[in-house]
Image (cartoon, rainbow, N blue to C red):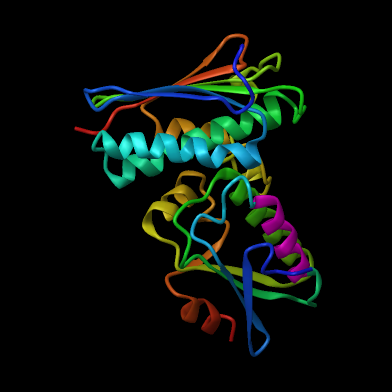
Amino acid sequence: MAESPGHHDERRDSDSSRSGVVVLHDVRTELDSLQRAVVDGIRHAGYDEASTFAVRLALEEAVANAFRHGNGEDPEKVVTVEFKISDEKVWIAVEDEGCGFDPDAVPDPTEEANLEIPSGRGIMLMRAYMTDVSIVAPGNRVEMVFRPAG
Amino acid sequence: MDLATAGLKTTDHDGIIRIDFIERNILDEANIQLIGEGLNHVVDAMDEPKLVICFENVEHLSSAALGVLITASNRVGSKGGQLRLSDINEQILEVFRITRLDQMFQIYDTSAEAMSAFS
């Protein structure tokens, strides 16, 4: 990816859609502005607050997982986020530079024995809040779609 | 440790410590580590800690925040204390329900109810 550090390439289209590609280097300092850009786009497209909450949470979970588990918190590795917002749907792809993972191997955090384990809920929340979540092989890219109900 | 730096405010109500988050989106990725350290600091300073974490100002939280709360709960439990949560808005309560953590935590509508349940 030939983007400069923290480079934002957001394009607002005339049909009230918005898209962009953002390369993140540090989840703690750069996630907030990305979330703001996506939330602004969602609101601009007329989505309600529940939709905004859902997409914002799923985006945060995907990016946090990409840095923590995908890149193993290696500061040399980046996370690339693509998003497209239209009146009909929000599409987000988050890709890390790790070697991927098998989503079926992640333990169910709602099992009684796993309730007190403090991690492992990110993918579950993405799936709960987004309409569709795909982990693209080898598992270092997640693509998510949110379509408003009704 | 300066709890305000961690975004936390504590008030002592006859030995029951109420913890508030100073900012609305405080439970996000940028702050979560500091908040975890702040909560651990409060727990470690008490014998049999009695804590109420009030979510009155919180509009957003992530699984990292849930992890911090679980760690705090385990820590409180290991010291023979109790942790209660209160004033959680409906959107955030849904996150607890989805993850079934509404069954693990003692959740009350208001901090007053959470505190009176200690006696």
Of residues A145 and A111, the one nearer the viewer is A145
Instruction: Write down the quadrant of residue B64 in the picture.
Output: top right
Q: In the figure, is residue A118 to the left or right of B62? A: right
Residue under the image location 56 percent in, 56 percent down: B26
Q: Which residue lies furthest to the left in this view?
A: A150
Q: Does the magenta stretch include residue B36?
A: yes
Q: What are the residue bounds of the magenta stretch?
A: B32-43
Please indicate whether residue A61 sits to the left or right of residue B92 in the image.
right
Question: Which residue extends farthest bottom?
Answer: B14
Q: Any magenta on residue A140? A: no
Residue A142 appears left or right of A90: right
User: On the rendered image, what quadrant is the N terminus of chain A found in?
Assistant: top right
| Quarter holding residue A101 | top right
B89 versus A12 height, above or below: below
Q: Is the magenta stretch mostly helix, strand or loop?
A: helix
Task: Name the spot of residue B23 as percent of width and height, x first.
Answer: 53, 62
Q: Where is residue B112 in the image (x, y as percent from the top left)?
A: 48, 81
Asked whether the viewer can see residue A125, the reply is: no
Tell me if residue A74 can be seen.
yes
